[in-house]
């Protein structure tokens, strides 16, 4: 399937049933807690995507300027949020074919988002935009697993969907990867250009003509989360660290690892 054909498909993105239920429950309160709603929405990839899509396309003067769930809630009515959450409830029961595990995907995405936000603070980039980039960086895999179930299942047998080699394997097999799928859809949905560029160039942030620091931040965050889940030794961390990306941003491996530790001590598990 050609990329432009895939991007035109009306594919529903599945949300966490628990998050959807909690959002709807909070919205049913006499005085909904906006902070709680923000935390819940920002823990779910699909809800974040739909919320930003509506916020960036609903008012012409805000097109391409809304970077996060918090900013979206500032410009949307709660009735619009309820409509999105209610629609998400019907898709929450979906299960993808192949080897993509929902809980693993959600956990990975949230970890990358938190670390990207922390790294963005160090390099004076937009922290909310960085969190959004981290949360949605791999949502192209959700799309691919729905649009191309057979090919995705075959790829899953060769390399895990969250493995660092996945993008290259998809490029070889499909002629595009989850990063290009995600970038294409975020552009269609009117997301800010830095977010779309970060998603597209996350695998090789500074090799193309576009220089987007958020892509470098995202690259480092993904590297660290993958390394943690792979149980990398100190030597493996040192040899695999993408130093060329760190040099451009002014971040060395110790800075990344230290920020990672700080981020994890202060995190709150929304999904558990």
Image (cartoon, rainbow, N blue to C red):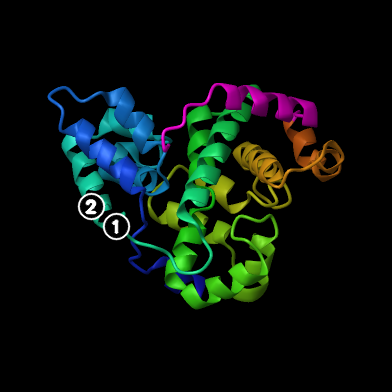
* Residue 268 belongs to the span the image colors magenta: yes
Above/below status of 30 relative to 113: above
Residue at disc 1, secondary structure:
helix
Q: Is residue 96 rendered to the left or right of residue 235?
A: left
Does residue 175 appear in this view? no
The image's mark for residue 91 is: 1
Q: Which residue is mark 2?
A: 87
Query: Where is residue 215 drawn, in percent x and y?
Result: 62, 43
Task: Determine the residue positioned at 25% across, 45% down.
Answer: 85
Q: Quadrant of residue 169?
A: bottom right
The image's mark for residue 16 is: none
Q: Quadrant of the C terminus?
A: top left
Q: Quadrant of residue 260?
A: top right
Residue at disc 2, secondary structure:
helix
Number of numbered markers: 2
Q: Is residue 163 rendered to the left or right of residue 144?
A: right
Above/below status of 210 relative to 69: below
Magenta region, residue range: 250-272
Query: Where is residue 11 drawn, in percent x and y?
Result: 35, 65
Does residue 237 appear in this view? yes
Query: Where is residue 13 drawn, in percent x and y?
Result: 37, 57
Is 12 in front, or is 269? 269
Which residue sits furthest front? 272
Query: Where is residue 191 drawn, in percent x and y?
Result: 42, 45
Task: Determine the residue positioned at 51% across, 51% down.
Answer: 105
Is 238 in front, or is 215? 238
Above/below status of 103 relative to 125: below
């Amino acid at each position: 399937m050609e990329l432009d054909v895939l991007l035109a498909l009306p594919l529903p993105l599945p949300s966490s049933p628990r998050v959807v239920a909690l959002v709807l429950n909070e919205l049913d309160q006499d005085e909904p807690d906006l902070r709680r709603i923000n935390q819940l929405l920002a823990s779910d990839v699909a809800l974040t995507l739909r919320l930003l899509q509506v916020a960036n396309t609903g008012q012409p003067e805000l097109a391409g300027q809304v970077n996060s769930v918090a900013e979206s809630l500032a410009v949307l009515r709660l009735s619009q949020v309820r409509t999105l959450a209610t629609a998400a409830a019907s898709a929450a029961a979906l299960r993808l074919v192949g080897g993509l595990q929902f809980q693993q995907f959600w956990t990975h995405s949230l970890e990358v988002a938190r670390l990207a936000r922390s790294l963005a603070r160090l390099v004076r980039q937009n922290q909310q935009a960085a969190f959004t980039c981290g949360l949605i960086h791999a949502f192209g895999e959700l799309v691919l697993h729905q649009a191309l179930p057979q090919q995705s299942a075959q790829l899953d047998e060769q390399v895990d969907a969250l493995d660092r080699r996945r993008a290259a394997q998809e490029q070889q097999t499909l002629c595009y990867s989850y990063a290009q799928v995600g970038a294409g859809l975020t552009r269609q949905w009117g997301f800010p250009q830095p977010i779309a560029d970060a998603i597209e160039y996350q695998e090789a942030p500074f090799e193309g003509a576009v220089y987007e620091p958020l892509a470098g931040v995202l690259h480092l965050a993904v590297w660290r989360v993958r390394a943690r889940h792979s149980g990398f030794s100190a030597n493996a961390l040192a040899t695999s660290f993408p130093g060329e990306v760190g040099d451009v941003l002014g971040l060395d491996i110790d800075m990344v690892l230290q920020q990672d530790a700080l981020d994890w001590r202060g995190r709150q598990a929304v999904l558990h």
